[in-house]
Structure formats: C-alpha cells, structure tokens
Image (cartoon, rainbow, N blue to C red):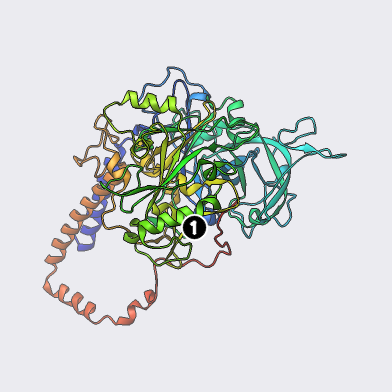
Amino acid sequence: MTYSRRIVLCVWLAWLLVVTEAATIPSSHDSRTSKLSTAKKGDDSFVSIPLIPHHVQRRRRMLETGVEDEALPRPTRSRRDLASTNTDREIQQVGALYQGYGTHYTDLWCGTPPQRQTVIVDTGSGVTAFPCSGCGDCGVPKYHANPLFVEGDSSSFHELSCTECLKGTCRSGAKQCHVGMSYQEGSSWSAYEAQDRCYVGGFHNTAAVDSGSNSPLDLNRAEAFAFDLKFGCQTRLTGLFKTQLADGIMGMDIAKAAYWQQMYDAGKTASKNFALCYGRQDIVEREGTEAGAMTLGGLDTRLHKSDMVYASTGGTSQSSGFYSVHVRKIHLRAGNGGDSAVSNSEGLEVRALDLSESDLNNGRVIVDSGTTDSYFSRRVASEFNRVYEEITGQSFTHAALSLTEEQINAMPTILFQLEGDEEANKALVEEHPDRQIVGLANIVDPEHPFDILVAMPPMHYMEYDSSKKLWQARFYVDDSSGGVLGANTMMGHNVFFDIDNGRVGWAEASCDFTALEAEYGTDDFASDFTDHTRQERPEPDDHVSAQEAKFEPDDTLPNSNSGFDMGLPNQFCSTMQCQLGIVIGVLAAVVFVVVRVVRRNTGIAYEAAELELQMTALPEDDDDMAGYRDHVAPANTGYEKTDEEMP
C-alpha cells in the first residue's frame, strides 16, 4: 500500500470510529437536568430574569437571527418539591436584562408578531413607554438600540379610547389617552396610551415560541408569560430620552399601570413583589457589564450571601408611588473592611454622622433603580465631609483621580442605617439566636437593634472610566432636598420590593446570574453574548469570586452524559461536546503517531529535504499577518456617557 493510501485509510478509520461512538451519545439537551428551583414564600412563585451585558445592543444587527431549536424540552430538577400541578403562576421564565451606564434594562417583546424594544427597569416610574412609528427625531437609528415600534405591523395592537385610559387622560376634543413625563433637567416625552400583547425576556435575537415546556430555563417559555399590556406609544422625545441607548422605560413603582402590577392582574405572577439584584464585576466592558438578576413574583435566595433583612417603607401608598425608606443614621467605616455591613477586619473605626433624622430625610428618601448614583440633601454635606476627612486625612472630592484598587479599598465604607421592619427582623433573630444576622444595626446602634445596615463600599460609590483610567466619586450630598438610594447603593444586594407587606428587603448577594446559570441550568443565553471588546480595570491580587466561594457541586445529580462515560471528572469535562472533543483529540494523536511511523520509513533523506525547505522560507511569508490585531478598538459610537441614562 502506498504512503498516501495509508494516510487516507488511517483518517477514514478514525472518522468512522468517532461517528460510531457519537451515535451512542444521548443528546445533552435530552439528558441535562436543571437544578434551578422555584423558590417560594408560601405559595408564591417567581419569574427570574438574568442581567446580560449592555454591549449586545450595539452588536444586534451583526448577529444571526436564527436560534437552534431544541429537540426536547429540558426537564426541571428542583432542590425543593414542586406542586404536583402547574399553572402559569407556578412556572418560571428566564429572559435577559442588560446593564447600561448604571441603569438596567430588559428586552420587551410586544405585538403579533412580536417586535423588540429595550426598556429601562425603573422603580421611580409608573408607566411603560417606548417610541412608536409616529415619533419623529426620536433617537432612531443614531442612539436607540431598536427600530421604532410599528403599530400597523401588529394584529393585536389596540389604541385605547377615552373610556379605557389607565395612566393617561383625554384632552378636550381628543380621542386618545394622552400621557407624558417631563423632568427638571429638560428631558421629556409624550405618548398616547395603547395596548398590545407583551412579554419580557426570552431569546435575545428572535421572538420566543411557546414550546409547552415547564422548564424555567426554556427561553421559549417567556411567551407563555405574555399578557395584554397597556403602555405609552411615544410620539415625542427630548433630552436624555432621545440620546439614551435603551428605547424606553418600564415603570416598576407602586402604581396601577406598573409592569409588575399589570402582570399580576393578568394572573402571570402570584404575589405583588419583585426583586432586583445588581452586581459589580471586576471587568468593565466598553458599553456595560453583566449586572445580576431581576425576579418577578418572589425571591431566588441562591443569589444571597446573607439573610434578607427588611426596611419599612413607612406606609408608602399607591398615591405616592415611590419606595420610601426612613434613614435613621449614616455611618462611615474606616477602609479595608470589605464589602459587607459586617467588617472583615476587627477594630476598624465606625463613626456616625452627627445629623438629625429630619436633616437626613429632608424631602423624603427613596430607593430608585432608574437613578445611576446616590444623593442626599446638602444638609448632610458639611458633617459628611468633616468625618470623611477625619477618617482618611483627605477631603472628599468628585474630581477624577488616578488610583489603584488598594487605594480605593482603603476609602471608607458608607453604612446607611434604615428604620427596620421590627416584626420581621425580630423573628429572624429569634429563628437564629446563636449567630449574628448580617445587615442588622445592633452592631453599631444597640438602641435600634432591628434597624438594618446597607453597606456601600468604595468600589460601588467610586466609578472607573476605562478610557481615561481614572476614578470618580458618584455619591453626592448637594441636592436641595430629598435623597435617592440609586443603583450604586443597590449593587451587591438583592433588593426585594415587597408591596403587599409595605417593606423593602435587603440581602447581600453575589448577583452573578451567569455563574448561577452555568451551575444550575444551561448556557443557551450565555453562549449568545460572548464579548471580545471588553476592557479590564486594575484587579486585586487575591480576588476570589463570590460564586467560587458559594456554589459547590451537587453530587446527587445524575451524570449529564449518561451512556458515555469517559472516566473524566465531571467538573472537568461534563458536556457531550467536551468529551467528544477529547475523543477526536485522542484519535488525532493516534493518527499522528501512525503517520510519523510511516513517514520515518520513507527514509531520513525525505526529512532532511523538508527541513531544508523550512529553513529557506523567507520572512516575507508572514506579511499577510503583519500588523494584525485580534481585537480592534471600536470606533466612536456617538453615545457619550452621562450621569444617568434616564432621570
């Protein structure tokens, strides 16, 4: 047999063996089980939605619109027993959220067939609205991520009459329900009220099609949570509403038009509550980072690193709309104490600001996810600056600074002491009498042991600008009145807006939905959002992610590749693709050895001739790759960073 025929025969035999072996491997989609549980409080189910990078918005038109169909729906495996019968109220949905410059937004699919809009998740607003086809000069396509919503393309679109207004009102002689918002800094929008079939989440690049699966990780399940949403069809935008990346807004305050309220009224969730878990990653991407999870109708406690403690909202009602909290005190803790309300270093100084509660709460303090930064009244400024300087020896400044992470971590942690829900927090202490409850204020204020402490470490109030490699403080004490605990205060916490019980829960949390999904579910959405343009900020030397510390393998789970056991550790290579790759690699190595043996039989002269050819190759042979860079810096998108994407 000639040399070339031997090579062909070896390759053919190797390929035949691989194909035969692969045919015996059950599909990973068929055998894979999910541990994502339907965590419940009583009978309350929830809808859990991951936060995914903001940069995907800019790349959408470059991505394929097709999504692989799964042959079979994935079965659900839960750590808790599920009810024997399921309804729409008891089935989870997994969708996608995105983080902008401090604000967070989700895909909202509306219409028949569905059209995608991106909307900021805003606990300071009570209406959902986005630009429609009649909106001229409304940020499309220069700024917004998606085209205008085309009412005429949806067979289920309905313009509300004056007898159907929910949030809006009918002007004299008009036939439309008018609704609008305007803000002091100049941004505004106007709209008419409409109704269409909508849902959040699902696949990122194509509409979901209900598969009938009960799996919370089947992205097609998002369509099962669709309902007739009343929203504002925007006809005019000014200011930040026009120049922001997100198309519109999803109102989540306490109002009858809020998204969560309409979803509850439609029977898609079983309780009037939701949670927002905002993370802070060590990598800052050019246009955003992974940001955590949103949960509708309950809690996913697997994100938590501590118990949930509760702040009273002081009888916040639907008339006020906002999630108000009462600030009892503000403390500054000396640096290098970690991110938690409980210091990881003993003996660190903790100083309470000498301020009255009336000064701290002048004009009301609210929790607002739609505001990037955190603000307090200027009545706080003098005392805050004095104590900060006494602790650090330096003045508090908003100037851009060149700092290392060690210098950032040496800055004080701000501790907000909020009036607690005494009944709930006392019950938690009685349930766990032998341990310190992280987040309770008894460690700094024994007179109010059931108040709560919300920690804002320097990594959360200092923001890194990767283009300038500078840091800047984003905590302000210069408002004329009122205060806002914005997105950077919420970072590192799962914040539970419990409308039924008039409280806001806070649990320190990793908020890393991607790690949670990687361990408990599938990589469908994660593989769709790989980014190759991210920029890194300086990282600490001993960084260990919270997920590495928290999540441990569950040895009770069946092998996801049953029927094809390579004898490899499951945590090393648990997928069919990985193990198939190893098989191919081993076979390739065998073929390589055979080829080398055969070639050696052709004589040393052949190898010498080959070596001579290699040695005489000219340097110019590599010119095609000269100057090539794997990651080219993106061009200016024209979207400049602002303090807030939306007021």
Q: As rendered, which of 554 and 394 lies closer to the eye?
A: 394
From where the camera sits, is residue 102 visible?
no
261 left or right, relative to 445: right
Which residue is the extreme one toward the right? 173
| Residue 467 percent across, percent down from the top left | 46, 66
Element type where label 1 sits in the image: loop
Which residue is more in the foreground, 549 or 393?
393
Please say if 14 is above or below 159.
Answer: below
Does residue 242 appear left or right of residue 505 in this picture?
right
Query: In the image, is residue 548 above or below residue 311?
Result: below
The front one of 359 and 617 is 359
Q: Position of residue 174 (x, y in %)?
A: 84, 40
Which residue is at 22% across, 37% downward?
A: 565
Where is residue 581 shown, x and y percent of the image? 28, 49
Q: How many marks?
A: 1
* Quadrant of the drawing holding the N terminus: bottom left
- Please name the residue that numbered disc 1 is placed on: 287
- How far across and how far down the image is residue 626, in percent? 37, 77
Quadrant of the rendered image containing residue 364: top right
Q: Is residue 625 left or right of residue 208?
A: left
Vertical order, 17 against 395 (above or below): above
Residue that extends furthest to the top in the rendered view of this protein: 84
Instruction: Using the image as rendered, state which of residue 384 and residue 256 is in the foreground.
Output: 384
Q: Give the residue type that dot 1 points to.
A: Glu
Picture residue at 16% right of the left edge, 57% below the top: 594
